[in-house]
Image (spheres, rainbow, N blue to C red):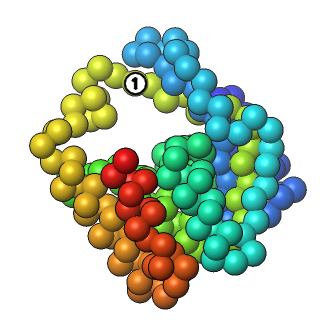
Amino acid sequence: IESGMLNRLFEWMSEEDADLYSYNVYKTDEQGTVTEKLLFTPENRTVSFYNEKDRFVYVTEQLMQYKTGWEAWSRVFRRSIIEKNKLRFQNCAEVFAEDYLFTFQYLLFTQKVNQLCAVFYYYRQRANSLLHSVDKGSVLRRLYRWAEYAATTVKKNQLSYFRKHFSMIYFQLMN
């Protein structure tokens, strides 16, 4: 992590109340050399959801299209939302990109997201990591399970707009 990350996050969190905070990331190679800057937010931005449709638009236009990333290590989540809604990470052998699913489910219960333009995290990519050793034969099954978990959460929480337009989420996931 970037030096001073926790202090700077705490300052931002004290200034701007939100349900989720996200920030930018550097990708590095195994030696720690920066290979790419994932600039999801070129400037600080706060997004408020006034209704379920606003949240749906953010999810489909930002999260599902990887414009804000979805990795857990690039976010600060509010514990009360996690506990109240009994959110948990699913087994990565069962669902594809378990942090993607978790972030999707978490966003269903948020009112405000604060996107910070600061780069706080160095994501080291190793040639022999789990990411680079995906069992291609299981990807479709694991994507389908992702969609099942997401649909169950939407249905259980009576999110009518998400339910009515869930085919768009499914299409974007499979795409």
Query: Is residue 65 something that shows in the picture?
Result: yes
At 44% across and 16% down in the image, what residue appears? 29
Q: Residues within 10 Å of mark 1 (few under 14, many from 20)?
A: some
Percent coordinates x, y for residue 13 in the rendering: 78, 55
Q: Please tell me in which quadrant of the rendered image residue 137 appears.
A: top left
At 75% across and 34% down in the image, what residue appears? 42
Q: So how many labels did they put on this image? A: 1
At 59% across and 53% down in the image, what residue appears? 61
The residue that label 1 is drawn on is: 125
The one nearer the camera, 60 or 75, is 60
Q: Please tell me in which quadrant of the rendered image residue 54 appears.
A: bottom right
Left or right of 121, for residue 157: left
Query: Is residue 1 something that shows in the picture?
Result: no
Q: Residue furthest right?
A: 15
> Which structural element holds mark 1?
loop
Percent coordinates x, y for residue 43 in the rendering: 80, 38
Percent coordinates x, y for residue 6 in the rendering: 69, 43
Q: Which part of the image, by quadrant, shows the N terminus?
A: top right
Left or right of 95, for residue 8: right
Left or right of 89, for residue 8: right
Q: Is residue 118 placed above or below 13 in the rendered structure?
A: above
The one nearer the camera, 115 or 77, is 115
The one nearer the camera, 57 or 118, is 57
At 34% across and 22% down in the image, what residue appears? 126
* Residue type at the position of mark 1: Gln
Percent coordinates x, y for residue 125 in the rendering: 40, 24
